[in-house]
Image (tube, helix red, strand yellow):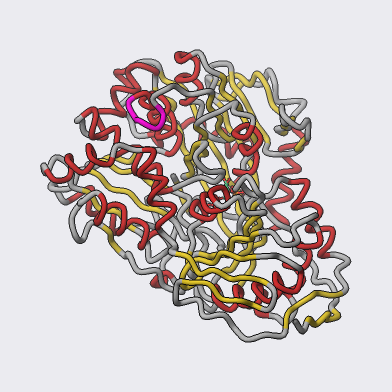
Amino acid sequence: MKIHVRSTTPFEGQKPGTSGLRKKVHSFQQPRYLENFVQSIFDSLDNFQGKILVVGGDGRYYNQQAIQIILKMAAANGFGKVLVGQNGILSTPAVSAIIRKYQAFGGIILSASHNPGGKDGDFGIKYNISNGGPAPEKLTDAIFAHTKTVKEYRIADTTDVDLAHLGQTQLEDMQVEIIDSVKDYAELMESLFDFPLIRKMFESGACKMRFDAMHAVTGPYAKEILENRLNAGAGTVLNGTPLEDFGQGHPDPNLTYAPELVNLLYHDPELNFGAASDGDGDRNMILGQQFFVTPSDSLAVLAANAHLVSGYSTGLKGVARSMPTSMAVDKVAEKLNISCYETPTGWKFFGNLLDAEKITLCGEESFGTGSNHVREKDGLWAVLFWLNILAVRQLPVAEIVREHWKTFGRNFYTRHDYENIELHGANDLIHHLRDQIKSLPGKQFKHYQVVFSDDFEYTDSIDGSVSKAQGVRVGFSDSSRIVYRLSGTGTEGATLRVYVESFEPDPEKHHLDAQVALHDLIEIADQIAGIKRFTKREQPSVIT
Ligand code: G16
């Protein structure tokens, strides 16, 4: 095989964020930019020669070009075989499932998740390890260190691989197998949930749903599983064809960016279940008739009802949530007498707990829920979990959630995002908060008294690694809290996230709108951090 060892010089700023390296497409199109990062991944790994790598992406602009480069580099660096999704398509949870099923050494996922795509949009790359999960910080730090010193990259001089047809080809000494993007994943879902029961629910007309794939990667998965295997009816899946620019949409399943679906569930009386997933298929949004289930509540409801679902009926080992996620699931864990872990934002922090079998379910406020079936959050999995619960309980979504609140109390919760603000102002705001950490406890704001304040630090109970400065927390005497952190997934300026939560045991007050129930705390959040002053914004850009 002819291998070129090409000279290169480092690019600045190739630091993986919350979930891999995300930049504008234009950045990735610069000669050597992707090559440097891929070589830095390979240089950070040991003993992968002859082993299997899984490669796929969410279908956004530049996906296929990037895959061709990665294949040639994988061949030149000594991988034995690469499994690639047909047409370069693999959702993030599917990559995780495939790595595990075929005992691959790791996988490369090309996605910028929910960020917009297209020529002027975002692109991204992340590396997953052999357990199927995101590379832990130790590895992403090593990759970043390599990007700062990379001097050459290895690439095979060979023709492009045909990604459109299933089957095996040889890329010099390395085998490339183009695999069905959906099959392995669909089989895994079928092993976890009661498909005959869910099918019966659809066929009887008891459930009529719409799934918005947002022109992103989940379209083919949702069509195969919901329409073909579960007979939910043709037309159940909206925007089901993956497009390079996601139909110019923002493939982020929330109330702001999925208006078509929200409108249907609020105005079409025939529909009683709605769901959506994001660019790479790991996020989910759940809607009932005129009802939005917050991701934090969704995790709590899944945990409380897991015993009804075949794949989880033997009980949960424990649960985990990211720190800013509401404490609703903590209440369920308490009742089930199982452990509840609090981790920093980022799915990678759940990996060790899942591998050590400390937890079965985990989730984040950022529309991510998952379990030990893979090592990524999983959008369609969450939808199927809900469908299985609906099929067993035969109650509307809203009733299930209201009943849950009655049993466990309601954690009112909201997240206010200030997107694309000036980096300078964002950093100043965080410094301003850090300066107050010591002086805040004891202070009174309206009828809330601060009892603690810190910058969240996490020690992994399995490997002892420590992650510092993961978000400033302000906790009040009634267990309400405000959390501030800067997003690690944006590509322009900075995004400030402000998370506000308070617990309400009184069912008479559970009907309140979260923005109303949290009104005072939202004002206090601004008072403490000077949000308007530092961001120069009067309003958040997204409220969830
Ligand atoms: C990624 C991570 C999640 C994280 C989310 C938001 O999700 O995998 O763990 O919660 O970003 O992170 P941030 O608040 O730093 O923007 P995804 O779906 O974008 O890969």
The N terminus - image quarter: bottom right
The C terminus - image quarter: top left
Q: How many marks?
A: 0
**Image height check: is 178 above or below 426?**
below
Left or right of 27 on screen, residue 402? left
* Residue 181 quadrant: bottom left
Q: Residue furthest left?
A: 204
**Image height check: is 224 above or below 514?**
below
- Observer-nearest of 259 and 46: 46
Tell me what residue is drawn at x 64 percent, y 53 percent: 128
Q: Position of residue 323 (x, y in %)?
A: 60, 33
Q: Which residues are magenta?
A: 308-312
Q: Position of residue 494 (x, y in %)?
A: 64, 56
Q: Is residue 138 magenta?
A: no
- Observer-nearest of 420 and 524: 420
Tell me what residue is drawn at x 79 percent, y 58 percent: 144
**Image height check: is 218 above or below 439?**
below
Q: Taken as a whole, is the magenta stretch helix, strand or loop?
A: helix
Q: For residue 90, say whether it is visible.
A: yes
Left or right of 379 on screen, residue 109? right
Q: Is residue 311 magenta?
A: yes
Q: Position of residue 239 (x, y in %)?
A: 31, 65
* Residue 46 quadrant: bottom right
Left or right of 7 on screen, residue 250? left
**Image height check: is 245 above or below 240?**
below
Q: Position of residue 351 (x, y in %)?
A: 63, 39
Q: For residue 25, say whether it is visible.
A: no
Tell me what residue is drawn at x 43 percent, y 39 percent: 295
